[in-house]
Amino acid sequence: MSGLDWLSAIFLLVGAAFFLAGTVGLLRFPDVYTRLHALAKADNLGLGCIVIGLLFQADSLAAALKLVLVWLLALAASATVSFLVAHRAWRRGIAPWRADEPGIRRHDES
Amino acid sequence: MNLAFDLLLIAALLWSAGRALTTPDLFRAVVLFIVFGLLMALAWARLDAPDIALAEAAIGAGLTGALLLDALGHLRGPVRRKSGLIAPSTVMSSEGAGPPAFPTYFLNGLAIVLAVALGLALAGALLLLPEPAISLPREVAAAMDASGVAHPVTAVLLNFRGYDTLLEVAVLWLALLGVLAVAGGRAPGRAPVTPRSARASLKVPRLLARVLAPLALLVAGYLLWAGAHQPGGAFQAGAVLAAAAVLLNLAGLLPGGATPRWVLRAGLGFGLLVFLAVAAAVMGQGVLLQYPPAWAGALIMLIETGLTLSIGLTLAGLFLALSGASRQ
């Protein structure tokens, strides 16, 4: 394996670790906001690391730019969807989870 | 490594299909159906059929999913199925929170037995398929030079079996007419009226839609052009156009409505009319839709351009007609 291959492997593994952490967070975190936080990490950093890892293997500048575009589009979609889910949850009166007050509570505004 | 991936994919497909059918929560069922469509697209890609993978992802998962979610939005309140497998209306007779009545169990069991029997029969038929007398892939490869394009799928769809595609487009168009007839009779659509609080939340998706729509247009143009020599073509390009229209509609930037104005109506029929005009013009060749070889490439590109526009409008229309009709 050449130096570039090693760099690729490292970034791909780091990206996979972010995806794993994001998935564990999605399954284990207590409420919708914290789960979104975990999910967005996987999308932003996980996919970002994987794209960087793949950039070292790209045949041409065009292919590399396409990979970066894929990442930017996924970022925009992930940010928008996270906002929509969180906004909807907030408007339905789901209060953010707190360590000292377990469980989901409804706040006054609805 | 690939085998492990394929087995995982098959397991995920079966799991999502089973859960989509049996989950009592309809919203969850729709989401699982979309997941199933995306996994199916992956399966097609693994089977080296990128054309079908593109169509499945765009239409099977994307557009159908959007339609199902929209339909779910019209059903007021939380909708729950009493039991999997059997449709809610059938189960309504066994009101009450207790376990399903005997006929439900019996019907579910019968459905499972019949489905398994059908599955086994289909698998058997596939495995026992006789060797075909004519090797179609070889015939297609031999005739590629005369087709006017370099991608075999496009050659089959628009040259060798062009009349199939012609009729498919007509069927799609008729389907939209059916939807318009059911949803129609309303005033031309306005952008949906939303309360102030909801309008603020639309700012972010609006920005996304404004960024994505031009890109979708670019991708559609690319897919249309690429169809001549690699996976792509009018259906995929049209589906991407439709997705952009649905996104703009959901972000409140494009009004829906079941009464398209004449420009839209002309656009809906344009592809079919171009196709018919070309078919009529080359009738002199003796066989339906047999192009003169020198013109084949240009004629196919002409038809595909018209079809992209009309398929995009038709697929978008299937969504916009229904969503616009409801929000006014």
Image: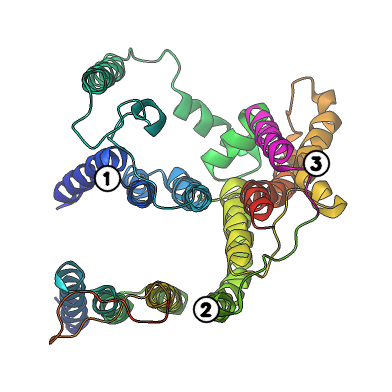
Judged by depth in the image, the label closer to the viewer, 2 or 3, is: 2
> Which of the two residues, B42 or B262, is positioned nearer the viewer here?
B262
Seen at 73% across and 28% down, the residue is B290
Looking at the picture, which amino acid does disc 1 mark?
A: Ser
Give the mark count. Answer: 3
Distance, label 1 to label 3, CA atoms, is 41 Å
Tell me which amino acid carries mark 2: Ser
Q: Which mark is residue A76?
A: none
Marks 2 and 1, how far apart at CA: 31 Å
Q: Residues within 10 Å of mark 3 (few under 14, many from 20)?
A: some
Tag 3: residue type?
Val
Q: Which of disc 3 and disc 1 is earlier in sequence? A: 1
Question: Along the line of sight, which residue is nearer the eye, A101 or B38?
Answer: A101
Task: Tell me if residue B232 comes above or below residue B206 in the rendering.
Answer: above
Determine crowd level at label 1: few under 14, some 14-19, many 20+ residues with C-alpha closer than 10 A: many
Image spot of residue B113 (x, y percent): 22, 17
Sequence-first tag of 2 and 1 = 1
Label 1 secondary element = helix
Q: Which residue is mark 3?
A: B274
Residue bearing mark 2: B201
Q: Are marks 2 and 3 in contact (CB under 8 Å)?
A: no
Q: Is residue B42 left or right of residue B300?
A: left
Q: Residue B104: where, in percent of width, then height?
A: 26, 23
Magenta portion: prevailing SS class: helix
Residue B16 is labelled as 1
| Rendered view: B149 above or below A39 | above
What residue span does the magenta drawing correspond to?
Answer: B164-187
Chain ID, mark 1: B
Q: Residue B148 sits in which quadrant?
A: top right
Q: Is residue B175 magenta?
A: yes
